[in-house]
Image: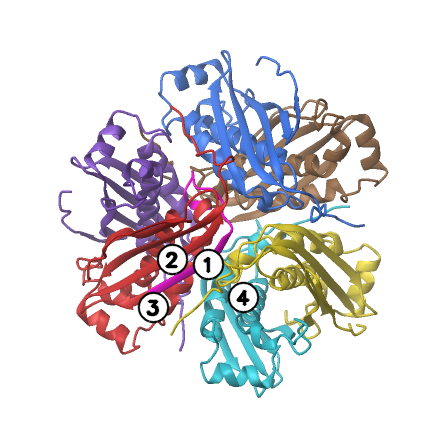
Chain colours: A yellow, B cyan, C brown, D blue, E red, F purple
């Protein structure tokens, strides 16, 4: 059985961009606490942005077959989405021989995990379990390769 | 605005265990290729297991307020779930002053990202977009603290 | 010529705490922009806290002869200090065989570097140089070993 | 509140160079021990050079909004500066879309921290505190961008 | 005493490729277990491939004077070599100012270490020692620089 | 196909020690240059010690199924071995639920790789190949578990 990193040696370095998004479902009480800046551990939205940006840069160390890429921009937006959700959206850019959708997805998921970590004390039930919390609908919503653009409709959270 | 790592200095070191799970939705054709061992980049299920185990050990480097913990076990299961999904389930154990749900979630999400990366050539449409692929239902299904156990019913994928 | 990590195998694991502090001198105009939340790259004080916490956990990967330690708490305070400075103070705790002053110093310096990075566009002169910016007075202000406490007067910035 | 990595996608890749410097103040007795090669843990100056070089390469993993850059050279000088100091000077080069002053500063500070770690047993007082030790005057002394050079007078230590 | 990273700032970016190989000697019984897929910890050959690929990407973080390079391909082959050996061969490619033989060697050695780790329970004697296990003959078998190719005869294991 | 990290949750934390060793074969001219401190890149023996110590701490990030362990000591010796070799020997200690032979082996191999990197300009032939250079005989020479000691005769290099 083989495992193969794609050989991109012969490919041209062109501009690449990818946007991924995802949602974490929380209890409405937790979302209210976030809105009111009452989360004891800090500000989850801002912290998630920073964690997401840092994670994008670690993608090739986390995903075995990803190439190390010279990212020229990482942008992570984190916003409250309705009464019981927080949405993370990450856009990554590079000029390279392969795309950056895995970087955008990694930034998104680490952003969501960071939100979870910061609010977990409010999400736990009395048995220490998380019956309400879940990360959902993590997907690539846009991928751009110099000259070729595609965009996929994003559903509202 | 403050940001606060929980001070666990005074807490006893007790056995901790957490299990997280999540799903990646793929095209049925892609799942069929996985079953038939025809994925060009390698074996996604096994690769995801290894990436998930390694990621669990990087949790405190990725999630800003997580404590570095001496993990005593990480187990990652990856299986085909129905006609259009792959499910990752990660269980992490430690003897420590705080729980390991973030480690289990990190292993799960990096496992799912690794599956995505390995099959992405089959999931892309002609415009290079991923209309079918999504990571769903990432959640903690079990958390154990020495003496106190809780378990939450897992829905079938 | 030899290089020797201190062998702490025979030492008891006791509670340890250390606090380090340091200052970055900035132009008064830059400090004013920070106060007014007008730094284009984001909020330097909060970002520095997160970067400092993460850096504390990387200490043994950065400083060759440091031991990897199971940190039980990292706290990083960042505050404006007078008209032309920002002060970072980091406190690290563990139960281990050796102290955590290097962890506190690492958190402090990476916190200061992060402030620099976030405001550097306002600190540069027309030749692209930094005649005003400097990190100063980085030191350990408190070190605690279970039973033995010491504290050193901190000068006002 | 937003956090923004500068988007350098449209910038040309040009030669960049930056030099940073800083000082660690030590007890004269400690500096004497360094000169006489009597530091028990090893050779602080050489070890600091290596730690500084390695740290330059980790800059974008430590400083949240730094871009990952393909460094073409890192040079770290460490020298005794007067009777009670050690000076670290780091020069970093790249061909990239953004400058390398943060890399030079990171190499410098980790070099200084490494010196501290190696001599800390001689700097501690009887209460285990460090009344004499401090890192001072860490700053960028030169920044070069292809065609544009600036240099700032360095004060003698 | 100085330590010097080679300054490659002025060198052109050209295609580079290097292949390294090495052998781990195991007990014939262990090799038989590998062939029969009976290793309790998993599939050593596949796991070694993944670990080797990931390690290639960490080369500049492990070897102090290596430059960070944008690898365009890493390929790791792991095969049973005779009755008592497993051979790892790694090929790394880049377009850069310096060669990738250290990356190929790092991938090879971490691949071999991974094999060791996975079979170590079968290699230990009753005193917990490894009288039979050894990594041998780790070397560079091919190095290519755009236009200039060399190859060295590889001995059969 | 499964991959299984050994579950050490139920094991007692006891003192562990392991020593590994290995050799790099070099041209006699290169060994002479090392002896005379004429290697342009710096001092290979000292640099290898530091790289080896740092690598021991990264073992669980490199070898997929290794547990993260709180190392209490890492000692790396590097010496010239005869006319055409350099020998690296690494000893690692911990108090943990599993042994540290992989840490000792990782320190040894990264130490050897660092020697290679520092002298490679003298080892290359005119075609840019390395016909003489090889890492040999990397093995565990001693493994200690509290109460149980074993030692294996080491052959002279």
Viewer-proximal residue, B31 or D107? B31
Residue B66 makes an appearance in the image: no
Q: Residue F78's x, y, as percent? A: 27, 37
Q: Is residue F111 above or below residue E126?
A: above
Circle 1 sits on which residue?
A: E73
Question: Separation of disc 1 and disc 3 at Cα?
Answer: 22 Å
Output the chain of dot 1.
Answer: E
Kindly identify which residue carries mark 2: E91
Q: Residue furthest right?
A: C36
Q: Which residue is mark 4?
A: B107
Left or right position of E145 against F24: right
Give the CA separation, mark 2 to mark 3: 19 Å
**Inter-mark Cα distance, 2 to 4:** 29 Å
Q: Chain of mark 2?
A: E
Whether pointer 2 and pointer 1 mark residues with C-beta atoms closer than 8 Å, the reply is yes
In the image, which residues are magenta? E61-77
- Residue for badge 3: E44
Evaluate if marks 2 and 3 touch, with contact meaning CB atoms under 8 Å apart: no
Rendering quarter of residue A12: bottom right
Residue projecting furthest to the front: E147
> Is there CB contact under 8 Å for labels 2 and 4?
no
- In the rendered image, the quadrant that contains the N terminus of chain E is top left
Q: Earlier in the sequence, mark 2 or mark 1?
A: 1
């Amino acid at each position: 059985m083989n495992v193969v990193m794609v050989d991109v040696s012969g490919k041209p370095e062109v501009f690449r961009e990818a946007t991924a998004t995802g949602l974490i479902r929380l209890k409405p009480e937790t979302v209210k606490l976030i809105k009111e800046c009452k989360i004891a551990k800090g500000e989850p939205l801002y912290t998630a942005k920073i964690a997401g940006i840092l994670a994008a840069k670690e993608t090739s160390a986390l995903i075995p077959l990803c190439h190390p890429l010279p990212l020229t921009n990482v942008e992570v937006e984190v916003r409250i989405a309705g009464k019981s959700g927080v949405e993370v959206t990450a856009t990554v850019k590079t000029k390279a021989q392969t795309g950056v959708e895995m970087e955008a997805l990694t930034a998104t998921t680490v952003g969501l995990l960071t939100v979870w970590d910061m609010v977990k004390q409010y999400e736990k039930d009395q048995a220490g379990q998380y019956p309400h919390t879940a990360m959902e609908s993590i997907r690539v919503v846009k991928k751009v390769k110099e000259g070729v653009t595609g965009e996929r409709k994003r559903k509202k959270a």
